[in-house]
């Protein structure tokens, strides 16, 4: 029996380490805002809920957009090679790139959740970890981010739909 976990792939070194360092070092931390989650249907929109998702988000600086796009393109090629029956279709697109910041001083975390729902259906979720100089913050499946206990965890996320 095929399980959803059969389709989870980890690809190492998909983004040059110097690019990752530049993204983290050059970011203006004042540009981050509280991350939001899809609330209950009666909430009619997105909401901040620090007990569910305690991290910050901003759009990736445009300066890095092309290099990340090329890396995502390579990841998709690798994924399609690993799963030849998987096709995203000509009308598929990514949703842009968000830079996430999980602060160790705030025990940044994200509870177990799904990335696809009626309002925002998605085919693939991608998370690109930018640094490893933090403690905790493990990425788990079905996915969540465990609390960061020291340092800051930086990642880029995107979805294909």
Image (tube, helix red, strand yellow):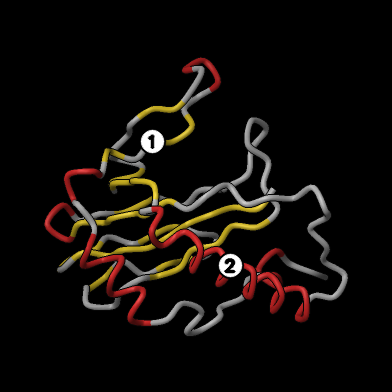
Mark 2 residue crowding within 10 angstroms, few (<14) / some (14–19) / many (20+): some
| SS for dot 2 | helix
User: x, y percentage for residue 38?
Assistant: 48, 32
Q: Which residue is mark 2?
A: 72
Q: Earlier in the sequence, mark 2 or mark 1?
A: 1
Depicted 41 relative to depicted 141: above or below: above
Q: Quadrant of the N terminus?
A: bottom right
Labels 2 and 1 touching (C-beta < 8 A): no
Of residue 35 and residue 130, the one placed in the foreground of this image is 130
- Residue at screen point 53% across, 54% down: 158
Name the residue nearer the viewer: 69 or 123. 69
Q: Residues within 10 Å of mark 1 (few under 14, many from 20)?
A: some
Residue 91 as seen in the image, left or right of residue 58: right
Tell me the distance, in whole angstroms, between the alpha carbons under discs 2 and 1. 24 Å
Which quadrant would residue 155 be assigned to in this image? bottom left
| Residue 85, image x, y percentages | 87, 70
């Amino acid at each position: 029996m095929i399980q959803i976990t059969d389709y989870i792939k980890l690809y190492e070194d998909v983004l040059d380490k110097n690019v990752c360092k530049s993204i983290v070092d050059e970011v203006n931390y004042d540009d981050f805002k509280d991350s939001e989650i899809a609330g209950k249907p009666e909430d009619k929109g997105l909401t901040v809920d620090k007990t569910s998702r305690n991290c910050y988000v901003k759009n990736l600086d445009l300066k890095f957009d092309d290099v990340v796009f090329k890396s995502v393109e390579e990841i998709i090629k690798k994924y399609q090679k690993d799963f030849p029956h998987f096709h995203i279709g000509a009308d598929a697109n990514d949703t842009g790139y968000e830079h996430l910041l999980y602060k160790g001083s705030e025990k940044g975390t994200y509870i177990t959740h799904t990335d696809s729902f009626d309002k925002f259906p998605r085919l693939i979720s991608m998370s690109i970890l930018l640094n490893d100089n933090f403690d905790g913050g493990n990425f788990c499946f079905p996915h969540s981010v465990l609390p960061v206990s020291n340092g800051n965890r930086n990642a880029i996320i995107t979805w294909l739909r």
